[in-house]
Amino acid sequence: MGTLYLVATPIGNLEDMSPRAVRTLREARLIAAEDTRVTRRLLNHFDLHTPITSYFEFNKLIKLDFILEALTRGDVALTSDAGTPAINDPGYELVRAALEAGHTICPIPGPSAPLAALTASGLPTDSFLYLGYLPRKSSTRQSFLQQAVDLPYTLILLESPHRLLPALKDMQAHLGDRQIAVAREITKIHEQIWRGTISNAVIYFTHHEPRGEFTLVVAGRAISNHPEWTEERVVMAVKIGLRFDESASALAKRVAQESGWDRKEIYRRISSLQENP
């Protein structure tokens, strides 16, 4: 019985391809690729000659039997266009079918745009929720965001360049003016991670045309029903807020609500840090 390997591939920088991923693609009997053209370029770069078959959104169910039959004769590697297979890419149905047929599933970890953006965002990473692409239609997108408004988790979403501004405006209207990190072209030459409030992101991308694919990392809803924070935690929250260019009044109000501290005392801390950064 063959093993189905889920092989993460670079999202831009070929140096992110791990030796284990290269070896797995070399030794597999077959590679099931979301885009055979993209995967062939990758194989050519690493001088690999493994047979390839297509496995993408519109043929993924048709190809199940073919790939399962290949697994009876040896190992199969699944790749997406870039990043980790089955994360917003085809793969779930194949994994389920392979498991039901008794095959082993082996992940070969590597690049992932959502996780890369999260770790570099400056927002909490201990509890987060990945929501994939926002709906295209504005009314559906607004309903989608409304369902997430009360969630305390850091939110990770994907968006295309031509829908970025409408999405940011809907986020401000339905989630409030939260902190956000807008990441694009991660690991590529023009990598950028913009950090600030959603309202400032609207202003920035109104004057700077969005280019590339975007990953949005948004602060979760603040929870106020917790014990009063320590001074160290308050100072850290203030410093992060200032780093994200929050206004002093908005920052004082937010941190006071979250921490249980007096708003005037928070404001004094902000003023002190602004004078002596």
Image (cartoon, rainbow, N blue to C red):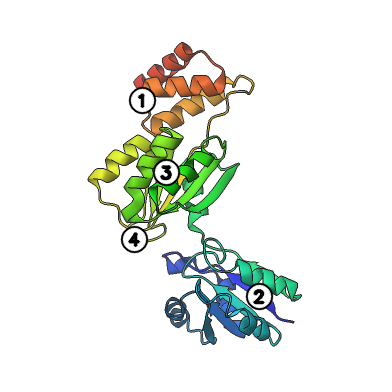
* Outermost residue toward the front in this view: 139
Instruction: Judge from the rendering whether residue 229 lies leftward or rightward of residue 101; answer left or right.
Output: left
Q: Residue furthest left?
A: 207
Label 1 and label 3: CA atoms lie apart by 17 Å
- Residue 92 rendering spot, x and y as whole percentages: 61, 66
Residues packed near mark 4 inside 10 Å, few (<14), some (14 to 19) or many (20 plus): few
Q: Which label is found at residue 189?
A: 4
Horizontally, residue 5 falls left or right of residue 213, namely right
Task: Name the mark nearer the viewer: 4 or 2.
Answer: 2
What residue do we see at 47% from left, 24% from top? 254
Residue 117 image offset from top left, x and y in percent: 47, 50
Residue at 51% in and 44% down? 155
Q: Residues within 10 Å of mark 3 (few under 14, many from 20)?
A: many
Residue indicated by mark 2: 4
In 3D space, how far apart are the residues under numbered discs 4 and 2 (Cα atoms)? 33 Å
Q: Is mark 1 on a helix, strand or loop?
A: loop
> Whole-percent x and y of residue 73?
69, 88
Q: Does the residue at mark 1 contact the one at mark 3 (Cβ under 8 Å)?
A: no
